[in-house]
Image (spheres, rainbow, N blue to C red):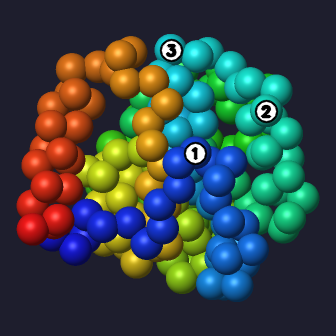
């Protein structure tokens, strides 16, 4: 069960304490897209997000977007931002996390994972020994069928852990 517990929780990506990450030795961030950076139906980044992403990169962190969503969705979103990305990632499987770390040239203990889902982002990151950060999902109503099932399991897991 402890593999489902994130190292850090934040309401939104904007609330993530970058100094704390730096002090923990983190040099790169693997971020989820849907409901982490923008709502699942938002095709492009908001001005606020663009500003935040450039701040993160100016602060010396590398960023890779790793999403289970399609090539079309992820490339349309990430290419205008000039941020490297991996689509159809099949999180929580290890392969995309490994690939993203390879793209950044970073080890697991230098890499953070940001995401809104316990069963993909947090579980996958924790299994790889990454610094996991869970944010609250942006727009629940636009989610797909499988994500809704995962949310139900997440809720049960959270209730279980509180006991
Ligand atoms: Mg997500």
- Residue closer to the observer: 130 or 95: 130
Cα distance in 3D space between marks 1 and 3: 17 Å
Residue 66, can we see it? no
Q: Height in image: 112 above or below 121?
A: below
Task: Tell whether label 1 touches label 2 (CB within 8 Å).
Answer: no
Q: Earlier in the sequence, mark 1 or mark 3?
A: 1
Q: Where does the image place residue 7, in percent across and percent down from the top left?
A: 43, 72
Q: Which residue is mark 3?
A: 41
Image point (76%, 65%), residue name? 61
* 99 sits left or right of 120 in the view: right
Q: Where does the image place residue 13, in percent across and percent down from the top left?
A: 62, 48
Determine crowd level at label 1: few under 14, some 14-19, many 20+ residues with C-alpha closer than 10 A. Answer: some
- Residue closer to the observer: 139 or 89: 139
Q: Earlier in the sequence, mark 3 or mark 2?
A: 3
Cα distance in 3D space between marks 2 and 1: 12 Å
Q: Which residue is mark 2?
A: 48
Q: Find residue 12 and name its label.
A: 1
Secondary structure, mark 1, is loop
Viewport quadrant of the N terminus: bottom left
* 55 sits left or right of 161 in the view: right
Q: Earlier in the sequence, mark 2 or mark 1?
A: 1
Determine crowd level at label 3: few under 14, some 14-19, many 20+ residues with C-alpha closer than 10 A. Answer: few
């Amino acid at each position: 069960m402890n593999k489902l517990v994130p190292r850090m929780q934040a309401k939104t990506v904007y609330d993530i304490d970058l100094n704390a990450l730096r002090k923990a030795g983190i040099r790169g961030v693997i971020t989820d897209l849907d409901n982490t950076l923008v709502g699942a139906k938002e095709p492009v980044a908001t001005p606020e997000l663009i500003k935040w992403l450039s701040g993160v990169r100016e602060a010396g962190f590398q960023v890779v977007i790793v999403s289970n969503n399609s090539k079309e969705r992820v490339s349309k979103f990430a290419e205008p931002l000039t941020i490297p990305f991996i689509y159809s990632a099949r999180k929580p499987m290890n392969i995309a996390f490994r690939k993203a770390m390879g793209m950044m040239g970073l080890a697991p203990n230098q890499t953070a994972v940001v995401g809104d889902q316990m069963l993909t982002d947090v579980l996958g990151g924790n299994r790889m020994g990454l610094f996991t950060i869970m944010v609250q999902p942006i727009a629940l109503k636009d989610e797909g069928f499988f994500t809704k099932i995962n949310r139900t399991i997440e809720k049960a897991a959270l209730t279980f852990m509180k006991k």
